[in-house]
Each structure stands twice: as C-alpha cells, then as structure tokens.
Image (spheres, rainbow, N blue to C red):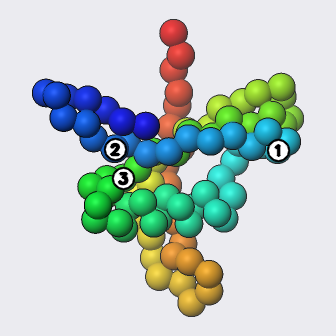
Amino acid sequence: MFYEEDKALFYLGDWHSHPTSSPQLSWKDKRTLSRIANTPESNCINPLMVIFGSYPEPWNINCVQYKRASRRLLLFDSCEYEQLNLIVD
C-alpha cells in the first residue's frame, strides 16, 4: 500500500488474505510488521497491515498499525500493534 503526496510515493504497509481462517495476525504477520518497521529502506516506522479473512464470517477485515517491538530470545522480536477501525464508504 502506498500514499501519494506532492508527487512522492510513501510506503504505508502491506495487505494479504487468510482465505481459510480469521483475519487475526499470525506470528509471521507480526514478524513481517517488525521487519518492515526496522528496515531503513521502507522508510515506514509504523506500517499498516490489512488482512482479509474468511472465518468465522464469509469475509472479515482486520487492520492494525505497528507500534514497537521488544527483543526476544526466540524466533523474532515481539510486536506491539494498535487495532484500527476501518471505515468503508
């Protein structure tokens, strides 16, 4: 996802689907948000992630914004995020 302002493009985040499960963040999604935020080339310290999921309803949408991470000893940094309300008109 990108945002355009004054003829410049800015990276906002990523979107994808969970076609057979809920739109909640998986550990891979959290790791991806952390990696995007900590990659200087993305120039996006608080990326968004939008997930479309098909369970328990036919399709649901979940939108979150990365806030911070703290270093963990295991697989990846823990990921703190804020749930966003998505308004569709």
How busy is the neighbourhood of tag 3: few (under 14 within 10 Å), some, or many (20 plus)?
some
Q: Nearer the viewer, residue 51 or 83?
A: 51
Residue type marked 2: Tyr
Identify the residue position indicated by label 1 in the image: 21
Q: Is residue 65 left or right of residue 30?
A: left
**Disc 3 vs disc 1: Cβ atoms closer than 8 Å?**
no
The part of the image, by quadrant, that contains residue 18 is top right
Amino acid carrying mark 1 in the image:
Ser
Q: Is residue 80 visible?
A: no
Which element carries disc 1, helix, strand or loop? loop
Query: Distance from label 3 to label 1 (Cα)?
Result: 25 Å
Residue 61's disc is: none
- Residue occupying image coordinates x 47% and y 82%: 71
Secondary element at image label 2: strand
Q: Secondary structure at mark 3?
A: loop
Side (left or right) of 59 relative to 37:
right
The x, y position of residue 21, in whole percent, is: 82, 44
The numbered mark at residue 46 is 3
Three-letter code, disc 3 = Asn
Point out the tag, 3 or 2, that comes first from the N-terminus.
2
Circle 1 or circle 2, nearest the eye: 2
In this view of the protein, which residue sits in the foreground, 25 or 9?
A: 9
The spot of residue 33 in percent (x, y) is: 49, 58
State if disc 2 and disc 1 touch (CB < 8 Å): no
| Rendering coords of residue 13 (x, y %) | 43, 45
The residue sitting at 31% across, 32% down in the picture is 3
Estimate how packed mark 2 is, as few (under 14), some (14 to 19) or many (20 or more) residues with alpha carbons within 10 Å: some
Which residue is labeled 2 in the image?
A: 11
